[in-house]
Image: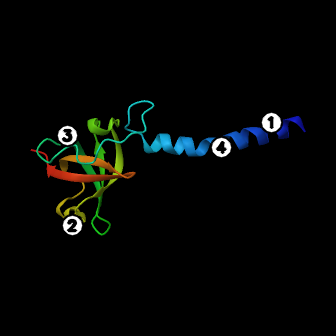
Amino acid sequence: MKSITTTLAALALACAMAPALAQEHAAHGSPAGSTEKAPATAATNADAVMTAGEITRVDARGGKLTIRHEDIKNLEMPAMTMVFALKDAAQAAQFNAGDKVRFHVQDDGGTLTITRIERAK
């Protein structure tokens, strides 16, 4: 009976912590302990921090690109492969898997959105 009570207590604790863990994930790029988001208009197109990457998949219908990218410095995000929405969904048709790109992404209310993208030179 004691182990069932201990298991139930651990489960209740995990359920209680779920919203906090979700918030921490949503603030992935934020400095430790900070839940404040940088203003979305902080970077203009001219001074946007660009990240290098390679497109691994194009979803033209959905306006999304899967990109294997370097560290995204403006979001303090490590290198990985992930799906990004395009601010201008029509741009997806301009790219193919294997294209090397440079892009700027912003956290738009929990959705990582590419606001600028260009082929790497």
Quarter of the image where the C terminus is located: top left
From the image, tell me which residue sits under label 1.
6
Residue 82: x %, y % from top left = 36, 49
6 vs 47, left or right, is: right
Q: Earlier in the sequence, mark 3 or mark 1?
A: 1
8 relative to 74 in the view: left or right? right
For residue 73, which numbered disc appears in the image?
none
User: To which quarter of the image does residue 52 belong?
Assistant: top left
Q: Which residue is mark 4?
A: 16
Disc 2 from disc 1: Cα separation: 53 Å
Few, some or many C-alpha atoms within 10 Å of disc 1 (few <14, some 14-19, many ≥20)? few
Estimate the spatial distance between the alpha carbons at disc 2 and disc 3, rounded to whole Å: 22 Å
Amino acid, disc 1: Thr
- Neighbours of disc 4 within 10 Å: few (<14), some (14-19), many (20+): few
Sooner in the amino-acid sequence: mark 2 or mark 4: 4
Q: Residue at x 16, y 46 (%)?
A: 44
* SS type, badge 1: helix
Q: Which residue is mark 3?
A: 49
The residue lying toward the viewer, choosing from 120 and 44, is: 44
x, y percentage for residue 12?
A: 72, 43
Please state which of the two labelled residues, at mark 3 or mark 4, is closer to the viewer.
4
User: Which residue corresponds to mark 2?
Assistant: 90
Query: Which residue shows up at 35% across the image and 45% down it?
Result: 81
Q: Amino acid at mark 3?
A: Val
Is residue 6 or residue 46 the one in the foreground? Answer: 46
